[in-house]
Image (cartoon, helix red, strand yellow):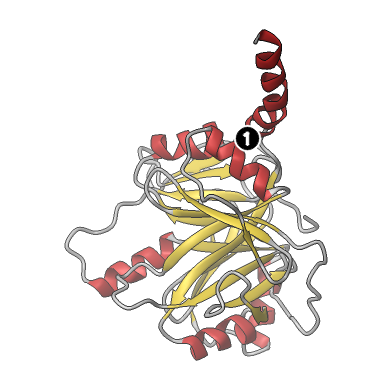
Amino acid sequence: MNRLLGLMLSLSLPFVAAAQSRPPITGISHIAVYTSHPEAAEKYYIHDIGLLKGPDPENPAGVRYYVNPTQFVEVLPMPAGTGPDRLDHLAYITADAEALRKYLAAHQVEVPTSVEHGSDGSLWFHVKDPEGNVVGFVQPPATPLAMTGANPIGHHIIHVGMSIHSRDAANKFYLDILGFKPYWFGGMKPDRIDWVSQQVPDGHDWLEYMLSPLPAGASAQVLQKQLGVLNHLSIGVVNMEQAVTTLDSEGRLDNQHTGPQLGKDGKWQYNLFDPDETRLELMEFAPVEKPCCSPFTAPNPAPAE
């Protein structure tokens, strides 16, 4: 009996070890948003931002707009009864989707019974964070996408932002379980924290907790605009003046936009908005002055990443 028990234990050890060892999470994969104006969204993402349109292996009803071969904006038709929020999910790149699924299951996170297989060879699955936000993990296909014909204003999604109510609850998931790393935090006023940036475990892209409360009693239109600011993506640029000049000279500012402005983190930024108010923030990779509120505690992303 003892020999049989020992054999069973030895056979189970590789599975347990695999479940306890987290595979790399190397960067941002994508942001998925709803649109009520598919044609206007297409013009915005292709003409204004310069992204490459492609089919959506996750959802045949959706469209992908690629920033580079592994990062994209997924635009989905808006379901009936959708409220003011246009965010469907955020997703991150992993080296091994199946191993990550097992790892999360071993840490008491509810996971699907298997990973999904895309027609492009990608693998992915979705879970929910402590506040019910949908979080995806994508293992990119072995063969990179050719970006022929694209003219993106920047080539790297360096961060995504999401409305978060509880910093502590989010940290238990993103830091304690997934291994994200603190990067920077700050606020509009010295005595308040509005933004908390946490880098992915094995890269320099980051998730920004957007802690600003929504206005009480606001109309659906106001809430949609506010949520569009909070639930956003950011594309890195080397030189903001050059990037904005390019957009202007090529007639690519036929949209709502604000800036340039110097953020509290000391980085130049410029905001553009899609037809459903989702914000796309251009941001320089490195600060030009000392940030407010807290120092950076991890390296900045780089253009070549």
Question: Which quarter of the picture shows residue 42?
Answer: bottom right
Question: Which quarter of the picture shows residue 148?
Answer: bottom right
Residue located 78% across and 76% down the image = 147
Q: Is residue 47 above or below residue 32?
A: below
Instruction: List x then y, in percent, for residue 72.
Output: 64, 68
Given the current orientation, which residue lies at the most extreme left position? 217
> Is residue 180 left or right of 211 when viewed as pictured?
right
Query: Type of residue at label 1?
Result: Thr
Residue located 61% across and 75% down the image = 56
Instruction: List x then y, in percent, for residue 155.
Output: 73, 67
Residue located 31% across and 70% down the image = 84
Report which residue position mark 1 lands on.
297
The reply to whether residue 181 is visible in this rendering is no
Query: Disc 1 on helix, strand or loop?
Result: loop
Q: How dense is the environment of label 1, judged by Cα within 10 Å: few (below 14), some, or many (20 and up)?
A: few
Closer-to-camera residue (174/209): 174
